[in-house]
Amino acid sequence: MRVKPLRVLGIDPGLTRCGVGIVDVATTRTPTLVHVSVITTAADLPLEERLMIIAAGIEALLDEHRPDSVAVERVFAQHNVRTVMGTAQVSGIALLAAARRSLAVGLHTPTEVKAAITGYGQADKKQVGAMVAKVLRLESVPRPADAADALALAICHAWRTPLGSAVTGATSGSTRPLASVDTSSALTPAQLAWRAAEQGTARRPAAHRLGR
């Protein structure tokens, strides 16, 4: 009996640019691109209109592609209060849209996503984008960076979900991993070598967020 791939919608929340990416992940942990885009809003629009545009975009993707679960970047404090407020508001919209459809939600920190995708929790945006393109077998890195970050979130969540599970209606925090998974099984020998090389590089200052 063929097991249906796990479909995950990754959301990199942002008020000006909200990255959204959908992947199908087989039981072999091999991900396949389904959709990627960025929902944008103009800075001069009233806040309520910007939130309405983003909500409509997320809900349209949920209804069209019917993912099994949703992955959202976990919001945490930043020095820029205005930025974190917008991020939190968009995250709330995403969580509400998922809850209305009884979808499981995973909240993941930037460090968790970077570690899952590259094997290095302090990888920079270029490294994350490059590995997303390699894992998904794309000819180029998705642009802008918000799009690549959304795909990274979706892949991270899928790799942390137990094989063959059908989890619905539950929200999981980043402090409680869904599973302990050997993600290397989804990578080619070249990708494994790239990951090993990145782990051996000098440590870089931690970024506050994957994108924005």
Image (cartoon, rainbow, N blue to C red):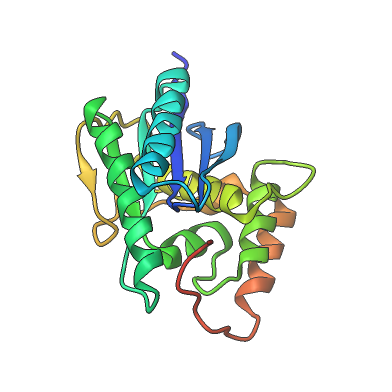
Residue at x 41%, y 65% (from the top left corner): 83
Residue 141 rendering spot, x and y as whole percentages: 72, 50
Task: Tell me the quadrant of the picture where the N terminus can be found.
Answer: top left
Q: Is residue 25 visible?
A: yes
Query: Of 142 and 24, which appears nearest the observer?
Result: 142
Residue at x 53%, y 61% (from the top left corner): 212
Q: Is residue 179 visible?
A: no
Answer left or right for 67 relative to 141.
left
Q: Is residue 170 above or below residue 78?
A: above
Residue 31 figure quarter: top right
Residue 10 figure quarter: top left
Answer left or right for 30 relative to 14.
right
Residue 96 rendering spot, x and y as whole percentages: 25, 37
Query: Of 64 and 177, which appears nearest the observer?
Result: 64
Query: Of 133 and 150, which appears nearest the observer?
Result: 150
Q: Residue furthest right?
A: 139
Residue at x 69%, y 72% (from the top left corner): 197
Q: Is residue 106 above or below residue 119?
A: above
Q: Residue furthest top?
A: 1
Residue at x 37%, y 79% (from the top left corner): 79
Residue 167 rendering spot, x and y as whole percentages: 26, 32
